Image (cartoon, rainbow, N blue to C red):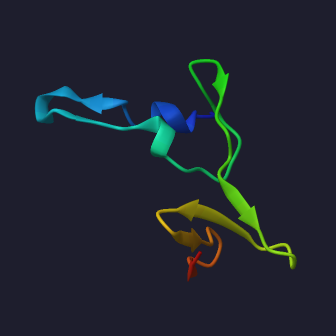
Amino acid sequence: MEINYSSCFPGSFPDYDVGINRAKSAINFDTSINGKQVQRNEFMEPGGRRFIQWCGLLMNGDSLELQAC
C-alpha cells in the first residue's frame, strides 16, 4: 500500500496555533499536494551528490552530512 508523504502530517495544528509553511518546506523527492506538484529543493554537486538547501545549509539526505552554503 502506497502512502502519500503529504498525508502523513497535517498542514496545521489548530489546538496549538501552529502551521506548516509549505513554501518554506524542503523536499528531495517527487510528490504532489492537493494535486499540485511540489518543487524539489535540491543542489547537486559536480560529483553527483545531492543536497537539500535549507537555512544556509546543504543537507545530504543519504549520509546526513551538513555543509555551509
Q: In which quarter of the image is residue 46?
A: bottom right
Q: Is residue 52 left or right of residue 18?
A: right
Residue 36, above or below 2: above
Judging depth in this view, the residue of 10 and 23 nearest the camera is 23
Residue 15: where, in percent of width, then height? 12, 29
Q: Is residue 29 left or right of residue 18?
A: right
Quarter of the image where the N terminus is located? top right
Residue at 58 percent across and 81 percent down: it is 65
View extreme (left): residue: 15
Residue 66, above or below 32: below
Residue 56: where, in percent of width, then height? 50, 69
Residue 48: where, in percent of width, then height? 85, 73
Residue 41: where, in percent of width, then height? 65, 52
Judging depth in this view, the residue of 5 and 34 nearest the camera is 34
Residue 37, above or below 34: below
Quarter of the image where the C terminus is located? bottom right
Q: Is residue 17 left or right of residue 38?
A: left
Residue at 56 percent across and 19 percent down: it is 34
How many numbered callouts? 0
Q: Quadrant of residue 31?
A: top right
Residue at 55 percent across and 50 percent down: it is 26
Judging depth in this view, the residue of 59 and 23 nearest the camera is 23
